[in-house]
Amino acid sequence: MTAAPQVKLKPGDTIGILGGGQLGRMLAMAAPRLGLRCQVFSPDPDSPAFDVVLNATCAEYADVEALELFANDVDVITYEFENVPAATAMILAARRPVLPDQKILETTQDRLAEKDFVKRLGIGTADYADVSSAAALHAAIGKIGLPAVIKTRRFGYDGKGQAIIRKGDDPDQIWADLGTKSAILEAFIPFSCEVSVIAARSADGNVECFDVTENEHRDHILKISRAPAGISDALAAQARGIAGTIANALNYVGVLAVEMFVVQADGGPKILVNEIAPRVHNSGHWTLDGASISQFEQHIRAIAGWPLGKPVRHGPVTMTNLIGDDINDYEQWLTVPGATVHLYGKGPPRPGRKMGHVTQVGATSPKSA
Ligand code: AMP
């Protein structure tokens, strides 16, 4: 990996954020506490992040002139989503430092490249195979067995672009339905729980990990995160070590999330890496109220070239996502003792749309996995 650009912001400087969703919004809310300003770039006029910044650029990611003007206005550029088009990142990087380095996106935008990268580091993943045709899918099933999970290599999120293949299913039909020419087939992992590590790395190589988080999904979308995860201290240390190894190998600057499966194996529980998100992550939202420093502030510090914080957790924490119509209960949540409610200011709720979240400190008794 190439060296990350050197950045040293001072109070009053401006951070450019690509993407105007809730992650961009919460990043933009964390910066002013440190005396930094933010400018958000998003093609969506209804971007929730626009509500919390003074200066916003509403333009397409292919709009070269808008990108150039945006770059001129800011001192460093970061992003809230991993699918930043390569051309967009290149145009911006020619004018201002982009952190995390845009070359990292080449690895994390492609599930095959990402899995190869993790495997090269000696870190466990589900067995996987490259699939680019129906014939290749049959061959991959022969190698990996069933059940298995097929995933598009690019642009998959919240369970979109993936399907489980079970014995008796028609692989040709599943391949046709997936509608892609590049996918990977992964062994189905009978995990005992899913965990994630939110790690921050500064340009000088310091890594700080938040406590390991245990995640519960409903309909492929994160519903509840609990910190600490109900796993042993040794396994948690291993999980944090894996995240640190990945951050160092990418020469990463900023916050990243590593999603992992905990599997009960003969020699005891082990960890397999499922996915890397080169950005702040939903499973780290608990840090806003549950720790002395949030993942958003940690990211801002890292890309500003400032020292990372040493986050201290305030107790057991539960984060509950308000998804779709869950938002209609926000007034009830407002009355729950100890609950902190975060609403993203989005338009109408749609099924699967993340509308807000609630953090409760001290409300968890982590199950022991
Ligand atoms: P992903 O888009 O890769 O993060 O997958 C979304 C969710 O699907 C994960 O959080 C798991 O709950 C499930 N999943 C993904 N890959 C596998 C796998 N290989 N085995 C079992 N479950 C999986």
Image (cartoon, rainbow, N blue to C red):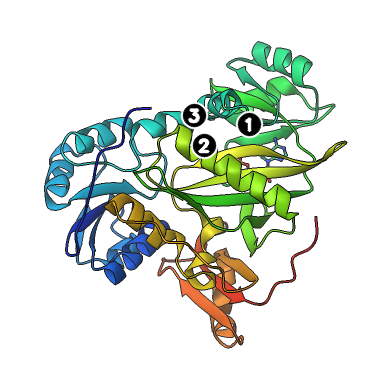
- Residue 164: give x, y in percent of width and height: 72, 35
State the separation of the CA atoms marked 3 and 2.
Answer: 16 Å
State the separation of the CA atoms marked 2 and 1.
Answer: 9 Å
Camera-side residue: 338 or 180? 338
Q: Is residue 230 above or below residue 113?
A: below
Please give the residue where the numbered disc 3 appears in the rendered image.
Answer: 110
Label 2: which secondary element: helix
Ligand 1 within 8 Å of disc 2? The answer is: no
Residue 109 appears anywhere in the view = no
Q: Amino acid at mark 2?
A: Ile
Quadrant for the C terminus, please.
Answer: bottom right
Query: Dots 1 and 3: beta carbons under 8 Å?
Result: no
- N-term mark: 2 or 1: 1
Residue 213 appears anywhere in the view = yes
Please give the residue where the numbered disc 2 appears in the rendered image.
Answer: 246
Label of residue 123 in the image = 1
Q: Amino acid at mark 3?
A: Asp
Q: Is residue 356 left or right of residue 150?
A: left
Query: Dots 2 and 1: beta carbons under 8 Å?
Result: yes
Count residues near mark 2 (Cα–Cα under 10 Å), then give few for <14, some for 14-19, many for 20+: many
Q: Quadrant of ligand 1?
A: top right
Label 1: which secondary element: loop
- Residue 169: give x, y in percent of width and height: 79, 27
Q: Is residue 3 left or right of residue 135?
A: left
The residue sitting at 37% across, 44% down in the picture is: 253
Residue 333 figure quarter: bottom right
